[in-house]
Image: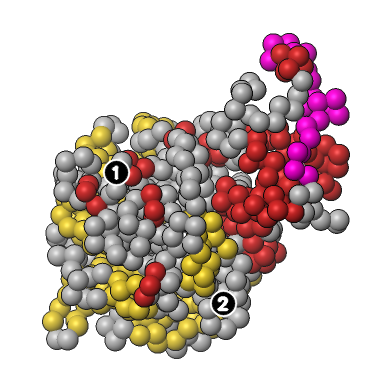
Amino acid sequence: MFSKSRINVLVPAALAAVLACSPTFVRSDDAAVRPVNPYSGDKVVAKEGGSLFNQFCSHCHGPWAEQGERPRDLRRLRIRYDADAIAMFYKTVNEGRLDKGMPIWKGVLPDATLWKIYTFLETVQEEE
Amino acid sequence: MKSIQKGLAGGFAVAILAAASGAALAQAGNEWPHYGADQSNTRYSTLNQINTGNVKDLKVVWAHSMGTLESQESTPIIIGDTMYVTSSTGPKYVFALDAKTGARKWSYQPELPSDYMSTVCCGLDNRGVAVANGKVFYGRLDAKLDALDAKTGKRLWSVTVADYKKGYAITSAPLVVKDLVITGMAGGEYGVRGFVAAYKQSTGEQVWKTYTIPGEGEPGNETWKGDSWKTGGASTWGVGSYDAKRNLVYWSTSNAGPWGAHTRGSDSSDVSQYPNLGSASQLAFDADTGKINWQYQYTPHDAWDFDGINEGVLTDLTIGGSKIPALLHADRNGFFYVLNRDTGKVVAADPFVTVNWATHVDLVTGRPVEAPNNEKRPQLGKWARNVCPNLIGGKNWSPMSYSMQTGLVYLPAFNMCMDIANREEEYTPGKFYLASEFNLGMPGATGDNLAEFIAWDPVAKKKVWSIPEANMWASGAMTTAGGLVFYGNIDGMLKALDAKTGKVLWQFRVGTGITQSAVTYAIDGKQYLAIVAGRVKGPPSFFGKLGQKMMEASPEGGILMVFAL
């Protein structure tokens, strides 16, 4: 589940093992397993992330995250999920929401790319 | 065509008769038997009961909910007194309705896997069915082709045309030719290799399948760098046309994939070695064997997503004193083409919107002459700025109409430009494969309007009149012998215009955006007008602030409205 190629291992290995084999329901948006963005607030990375966003995400989520379909509007992650936004982002991008059209990006986009994109998204969050 | 009004059997007899009569350019009358009205895709009806004098009196006679909420792009087919129409999202429903009253005769819900949505690029649409020999045929977003019994709605067969998990899908109505049902496929944004395939109407058995991109050892394969032909797109998600006299099926192909041209060739305006044959092209297939008879490439070594799938409209034109068997095509690349449909030779190619990526099309070589110094061509790591038209095109899939009465083509156009650059990207099956970055949130190429509805003279090669539309986009067109042209817009306004002058004679707000054309038919001597509406949802998502405007123009929806005097 967490290969060596992933440069930012976000969940302790022990917990990962639990996740992988335990039938116990573990919420990925639980604060205990909340991932951390290693680039948070880095303006240079945010710019690069914007470009990556435009390349990989904008076809559905709009260039610079600008578009009008509410459920796909990633400028509203914070309003929608508050402190859970980062976990929802990480889970949804990796696991997809196939029945809503979101593909699985795990194995295609490495964590570094994901976090660069998230660093960009942090800069465009709306207040209301 | 004289129609029999009583019962299904009568209706089908008429349909078969029309197909068998061999009239190359049969016209639609009481029925609307094919997606494009006729197999020439003219979307012209000989009905004239509703005309310029009385169209103002049109009233709603019935309405029907489509049962889904996005991107309603279906063209109803009317055979006898039955209307066959699909909803979006799969389709979720195939309906057979009493075309006079709207009463439901049957409905069918295909079972689609829940994950197909993640491999459909641009909206969960379905553009409708084809009907022949008592069967209803339609393609699905999970890349299957189904046949239903036209009388009962019972499923007769279902075949897998391609693997949806690799990005294949079917969005447009198939084409029925003799005992075949022929379909294209979508997936040009997923690294697919395009094809057209024909199946027996009776059993679903495949009769032929022809790839649009030449394979190893075939002529033209060398126009693709390395293995790029394997993932080169050139899908066929639009509709086909058929010329019975020549026994040729015409289908055109999408953008080359991925959009970033560095993956496929020289990555420059020197397209001589790597034009990527088969992509962004018009192809003519032998209807019985699928063998490619001729091909003409609209956009060599495409780098702009100048997807060439827009319909080919067949008619005969008299140009310079000689009669030309023409195929008319308004391409995304901004040029309006007149091709000789016998030979594939380009007769005319003229810009119908602002075009700056090419200065003109050289009618001797047949190739566009690109702006100098690669200025408007995106390259790896290099932006091309203010390229017009943008990737939605001078015209997108919403169909144009050719009026036999005025000799004019009526087409919905965009007035837009873009910035675009190529990026490095690895191919992963079933994932978006664009290798491109773009910005579409730019003002109109000329003026503030983002779209317009154009009357184009294909012989004089010029615009006759046009109506600006503030918002993108204008819907497909339909013309009638009543001197009318109909179209709608994303605000949900359906309009009837005097086809000669462009004067608006009637309009009606249907409540949600319109992208497909209206259709017309007659039962018991009474003419009806039908429109399927439901605002697009896919494309606005990548249009930035402009997309936001589109979404705000009208709510999503799904409604079929029918009008009569």
Q: Which of these two is toward me, B437 or A26?
A: B437
Which range is magenta?
Answer: A18-40
Q: Earlier in the sequence, mark 1 or mark 2?
A: 1
Mark 2 Cα-neighbour bin, 10 Å: few <14, some 14–19, many ≥20: some
Q: Residue at x 26, y 32 (%)?
A: B205
Q: Secondary structure at mark 2?
A: loop
Query: Given this view, does label 1 or label 2 mark the residue nearer the observer?
Result: 1
CA separation in Å, label 1 and label 2: 38 Å
Asked whether residue A27 is drawn in magenta, I would say yes
Is A72 displayed left or right of B328 in the figure? right
Please indicate, yes or no, whether residue B229 appears anywhere in the rendered image: no
The residue shown at (68%, 35%) is A92
The residue sitting at 49% across, 62% down in the picture is B382
In the displayed structure, B90 sits above or below B411; it is above
Q: Which residue is mark 2?
A: B444
- In the image, taking residue B139 as reference, residue B109 lies left or right, namely right
Asked whether B316 falls inside the magenta stretch, the response is no
Q: Position of residue B374 (x, y in %)?
A: 39, 69
Amino acid type at circle 2 is Gly
Residue B345 seen from this side: yes
